[in-house]
Amino acid sequence: MTDEVPLATAEPFRVPTAPCRPEDESSFPAWEWMPEDLPLLPIDCSSEDTKEHAYGLLRVIDDDGKAGGEWNPKLDPEILKTGLEYMLRLRIFDERMMKLQRTGKLSFYMRSFGEEAIAIAQTMALEQHDWVFPSYRQPGAQFVRGRDMVSMMNHCIGNEMDNVKGRQMPVHYTWKEGHFISISSPVGTQFNQAVGVAMASAYKGDDQVTITWLGDGTSAQGDYHYGLNFASVYKPPVILCIVNNQFAISTHANLATGGPNFASRGLPYGIPSIRVDGNDFLALYSITKWARDRASAGHGATHLEVYTYRAGAHSSSDDPSRYRPKDDHLHWPGGDPIERLKNHMISIGIWSEEKHGELIEKIDSEVVASYKEATSYGDLANGPYPPASTIFTEVYETVPWHVQEQREELGK
Amino acid sequence: MAEMNIIEALKSSLDDLMKRDPNVLTFGEDVGYFGGVFRVTDGLQEKYGAHRVFDTPLAEGGIASMAMGMGLNGLRPVAEIQFADYIFPAYDQIVNEIAKVRHRSGGEFTAPVTFRTPAGGGIRGGHHHSQSPESQFTHTPGLKVVYCSTPLNAKGLLTSSVECNDPVIFFEPKRCYNGPFYGDPHKLSTWKGHPDADVPEGEFRIPLEQANMVMEGNDCTVIAWGTMVHICQQAIKESGVSCDLIDLQTLVPWDRDTVVSSVKKTGRCVIVHEAPKTSGFGAEMSASIQERCFYHLESPITRVTGWDTPFPHTTEWDYIPSTERISKAIRATQED
């Protein structure tokens, strides 16, 4: 045989790795996309019409803090101030909760550091009665819906006042009153559930849109593809978001797909798909409002890649300096979402460093007062916990005999 | 009352439920226009429209998650999984999501989904059209598990399952859809003339958690569900032993009082199921019964089950518990 094919000399198969490891200098390709680049789209557009938007990057606030382009939502200054306040509140809330975790007052925590704009801007762009079906890094939506911080802290602690009765790990919020659906640890399970929620709204004739999020790593799960496919087939009023924050614990996004990006994966499903700067409050608000208008008008799902960077650790159990440069997030071309909005507000003359400092002080004291109140109802180190009887209740609508027997065996 | 087979009885239940409650929807693979591969939803799409009775993509995991979402948002979905063997892509959604959401949300959210699924062997279905995976679900708190066996209880139990505010896995013995199966593959039977083929046409319920005493006797309690109920009936006749035959109907939560009082009366017990023996629901029954009835027992509780092997194709009659194996086990309980 003269044409024998030689064995591959390279690796037998490709195993992608992260672009930078702890010993490396951080390097991100510079963003070429500017706010003027992508045209506004009609809400009845096809997936084909969004091709440029799926491979591009939708931005409104440029590197100098100026808002521009056709997607500029031109929001009322009060909305910007509210958004900034919620984002700051989330950051300060997270820092306080991390301290509680480190002192053993709660078991575990997950910050939204660097991703504060996402759930806050997106939920603000929705109607109050729309369904929010989050993963664990969208707790900020609850501020938008008016949830009291004490109530959120009670849950994280798992004390007597926890509305889910100490049954779930911290950050796994449930809040039906705010149309905020229960968070589950298995990642991505909510994606096609959100499609079902949206189908039920459509069936009942409610003008309710459902939004859901999952991460870049989670988009490797079947549930992501079920969600896209079912949404593609039934066209329910749903907004399907991938938060591409580059990391799933230590696993880089380039192990979640071999494709060019995440947004474009919606195109072959026939779903309009757009990649948006996840640290740009205005771009997030604008695209979500547009997606809501599409959904509400009966044009079905929108698929968004929210392009961001997980500035903090995955969770209180994680140390990212083991797998990426320590200051990596400082080099992210999208910057910090709070700084971005703040600078924009200063540039249009509705905000100042002084007002910003005052706002931080105000929030700080609110957070401190909230945590003092929440811990007064009990903390993980000292209790009191919810009664042990809550192990046995709400497993079923009523307690069946075999569960009742076991409760009696525990004797509490 | 009308004479029905199991397929007609299930359809009659769905028809009644959909007539009374606009929040009841049903969907699954081939369920809509075609009416299901076993014809359970035949004619329902025409009657209730394509938004209430519809086809889904071939993705059981997607069917389950969509159903959960609908349940969270106030509907009462009935999802068909075409064969119980194909329920496993939905397992995470059922076990981690649907079963737990009431508890994990502090009771704020529930997902009252019913999964209907044909199960069990006897149709030459091989590994993947024959399994009876009830114990994969009885081990999950938050689920109710129901197994019908006749047209009458198919209708009564399905109506109660769908109306139940807890999620229910509802197994249908596919071998018995068109007639009871007494264990001899050469003898075809239909439901015609069977007392349990006489089914009320309108609203009709059999409470969950209630077993059915199929036959009464004195010397042994035989417990079964699904197709095995009929095979046991035949086996009891062949054994010549006077037996209580209990059709468990609901496996979780099972009817403790009926079972315990029967075993205390007879002092002997044989549990029969098609599923493999190890960790089958018979093991749970056997342990629970001995905990409650030990001092009344005259002989060991025994199990007659499928083997701990994959379900075979051409040799399935050597896999499914036969009347010979069951009657032998019953007779063995009578020996000193």
Image: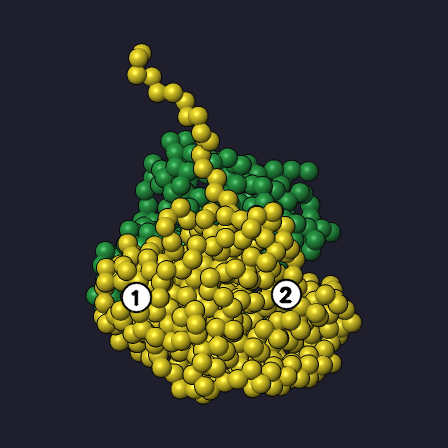
Chain colours: A yellow, B green
Q: Is residue A219 left or right of residue B298?
A: left
Secondary structure beneath dot 1 equals loop
Instruction: Tell me which residue sits at (55%, 60%) in the image.
Output: A329
* Mark 1 or 2: the one toward you: 1
Q: Position of residue B213 (x, y in %)?
A: 51, 57
Q: Quadrant location of the N terminus of chain A?
A: top left
Front residue of this view, candidates B86 and A219: A219
Q: Nearer the viewer, residue B20 or B189?
A: B20
Visible residue check, residue B3: no
Q: Position of residue B285 (x, y in %)?
A: 60, 51
Which residue lies under the disc numbered 1?
A37
In the image, farthest residue toward the right = A382
- Label 1 marks which chain's residue? A
**Residue that sits furthest to the top in the current view:** A1
Disc assigned to residue A109: 2
Q: Please name the amino acid that badge 1 sits on.
A: Asp
Say left or right for B167 vs B297: left
**How crowded is the residue under tag 2: few (<14 C-alpha within 10 Å), some, or many (20+)?**
many
Q: Secondary structure at mark 2?
A: loop
Residue A82, horizontal then vertical, whole percent: 49, 84
Whether residue A316 is visible to the viewer of this picture, yes or no, is: yes
* Number of marks: 2
**Image position of B91 with respect to A190: above or below:** above
Quadrant for the C terminus of chain A in the image:
bottom right
